[in-house]
Structure formats: structure tokens, C-alpha cells
Image: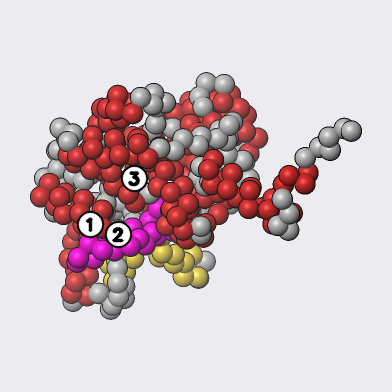
Amino acid sequence: MIIPPLKMNLEGFKTLNELHKVLGGQNKVIKFTDSPIAIAIMRQKKVALGYQFNYQTERKQKILGDTQSLRPRDFSARTAGVYSDMVNNNNNHINAMTLKGFYDDFVVPYAENNLKDAKGFMQRHKPLIETYGGEKLADFKKYLISQLLTELANRVSPPTCARYLAAWSKFFNLAVSYDFIESNPCKGIPRPRENPPRDRVLSPSEVKALVDAALSDINPVHAYSLLFCLFSGLRQGNVISLRLCWFNENYSMLSIPDSKSGKPIYMALNSALQSLIKHLLPYSDGTYLFPSSLSTPSNPKPMGKPAKCLARLVERVQAETGITEHFHCHDLRRTHASQMLRVSGDIRLCQQALGHADIKTTQRYAYHSNPELLAASEQTVTALLGGCELELFNPVTER
């Protein structure tokens, strides 16, 4: 079967995926009209994208990605750069790339195609691009990141600074993956920490008031998403983007393929979560458990963060309990973690449930209850005294 060269656009990629259903596994090479070196190869499980050319009697070939991970614009830019280097026999294309150029040509398409909060991710790059956009990517130094982070710390909180640093680190990791630089200059820069770290945990009366308020809220989809955070301990970003295909057929298990730590999350769902899911299914768009109001079967979209709903629930909890200390959505995760640790006593189990890569992160969520700390302290002293009465240590009365 002879396949003519295809256009390097969305329609061309769609044609490739349709051909793969017929030719998958035959390692058939297909060329593109837009580039003399770009090729597609029908692998067994996917359509690989890369380049192939002869240079000084040698065959040069490299796979850059596939039709699921690369957009036509990204693929075109990368192969154009390789071809430019080959023709000019130098690395001018790579050496001349600026931070602004890489951001426009690679980071923005990546965010729009892969990230749930693409707008927020791109917004966090604004200080980096405004300050250093004209700098050459290949010559960028770590101290410039530290300097910018220090300036930023004067305007925003430590957790916000940490989010900016994480976005910049992703920026440079992409540059490494595209072979523009060899190492990430953000690597080794410590994340700013809250001082003191936030440790807000809801009391039992607050939890009860929150559940009652959520079950009677005017927006059940948003309210139930907050209950899902509380009953599962999942991050809000994971909850609002839950897909129905990640659950097993009776909704007793959940498998999230990717998370903040870069690892999948496997979770056994408790009875409260299973009950929530059953009530949510009628609102689903067939793709997402928590769909956007703008979602359609042909263009499914997850809901946004339920900020207004959370504000309503916080107000009702404060009125019901008399506790006026504010709480955020992430405090629901912290409350779940603290309660799990309290009833199980197993921090490793808690770490696995929360999907933390490092147990030190789990420790920041743990042991917020003074009664448990007091009981542990009493048991420790009793063990040290070997059963002796504490009265033996009262000061001796002067005779």
C-alpha cells in the first residue's frame, strides 16, 4: 500500500491515526509534504513521529514523540530546527533560541494541549519572560532564577512562590526534553516554605456542619466536589478532573494515571464516596464526573474550581459552629490525612493514600490533635518511670 506524503496539520495527524488501525505494527514510514526530513512510523501501539535523513554517508534518524504527545506545530518547529542545523552544519538554531521564543513556540502549545489549568500555568511564566525573555536559553544560569525568586518573595506568599518555581522548572524540563539545554537551572533551588507552615484542620463540629451545608447547597455538583475532597483526601485539581473511565465498573476503585508527584494514584473508594458518585452520575457529561456547565458530548470539559460554592459553605459552617477561622479547600485534604493517621496509626498507609512521593510531605499533614499528642506524651513518661507513681517526684516538704 503506497501512502502519499501528508500535511503536517491536525487533519494529517487524524489521517495517520486512522491508517494506524489498518497498518499498526508494520513499521511503515510515511513522509510529510511540509518537511524533507519529517517522518511518521506505524508502530504496534502508536504512530511515532521523528526525522530521517542521510548526512555524510550516515543515516540519521530519531523519534521525537507520537501523534498523542506532539502537536503539529511542535513537531514542525523541532524538525525545522534539525533541518536548519543540518543545512548550515552548525547549531545556530539551538544557540539562538531565546526564552521568549521557546515559550511562544513550545511552552504555550504544550500547556494548551496537556494542562487542565493552562491559563494559570502560563500566567506564572509572566515574571520570567518579562525579566529574561531576551536571554539565550542555552546560556541561562541558575543564579538568575534565584534572583528572580527573591524579588518575587517580596510581593507574594511562600506557597505562591513555590508554584511559580514549579512552573519555571517545568519550562526548563521541556527545554531539556527538546534538547535545547542539557540540565534544568531550577534543579537544586529549594522551594519557599510557609513560616509557620499552614496546619488548619477542621474540627468534628465543622466537618458535620460542612457536610450538612454541602448536601443542601444550590449547586450540588460543586458542593459534592468539595465533599469528594474531604472524603478522599485528593487534591482539588485531581477531583474536578476525574474521568469516568478511571473508575472500575462498580465504582469501588479509582486509578488516576498522573498526579502532582508524577506517579499514578490507586485508591479504594469508601462507601461515602461510592454514594456521592451515584448521586453525581446523572450530572455527568459521559466523560467527566464533575463536568463544566459548558460541557457537551462532542466537547467535554471539566468544571472549574468551585470558589463561590466554597465561600458559601465556609460562611454556613462559621454561622453553625461559631468558629470564625477561615479554611481553604486544601484544608479538607489535610483534615482527611490527619484523621486517617489518627485512626490507623500508619503514616506509610497515609502516604500511599495521599499519593505523596516523599514521606516528609505526609508528616506535615500529621498529628494536629493535641489530645493525641498529650496521650502519647503521658504514655512515654509512664514507660520511662517504669510504673512508678509521679507523686514520688514532688518536691520534699521542708521540715
State which tag comes first along the sequence, 3 or 1.
3
Taking the spot 14% from the left edge, 43% from the top edge, the residue there is 295
- Look at mark 3 in the image and give the residue it sits on: 230
Look at the numbered disc 3 and give the secondary structure of its residue.
helix
- Between the C-alphas of marks 3 and 1, the distance is 14 Å
Quarter residue 121 falls in: top left
- Look at mark 2 in the image and give the residue it sits on: 269
Tell me whether the residue at label 2 lies in contact with that at label 1, contact meaning CB atoms closer than 8 angstroms.
yes
Taking the spot 44% from the left edge, 38% from the top edge, the residue there is 201
Taking the spot 18% from the left edge, 61% from the top edge, the residue there is 15
Q: Quadrant of the C terminus?
A: top right
- Look at mark 1 in the image and give the residue it sits on: 274
State which tag comes first along the sequence, 3 or 2.
3
Look at the numbered disc 1 and give the secondary structure of its residue.
helix
- Left or right position of 9 against 163: left
Look at the numbered disc 2 and give the secondary structure of its residue.
loop
Q: Position of residue 297 (x, y in %)?
A: 10, 49
Camera-side residue: 44 or 339? 339
| Region rendered in magenta | 246-269
Quarter residue 333 falls in: top left
Q: Position of residue 104 (x, y in %)?
A: 39, 37
- Left or right position of 111 against 223: right
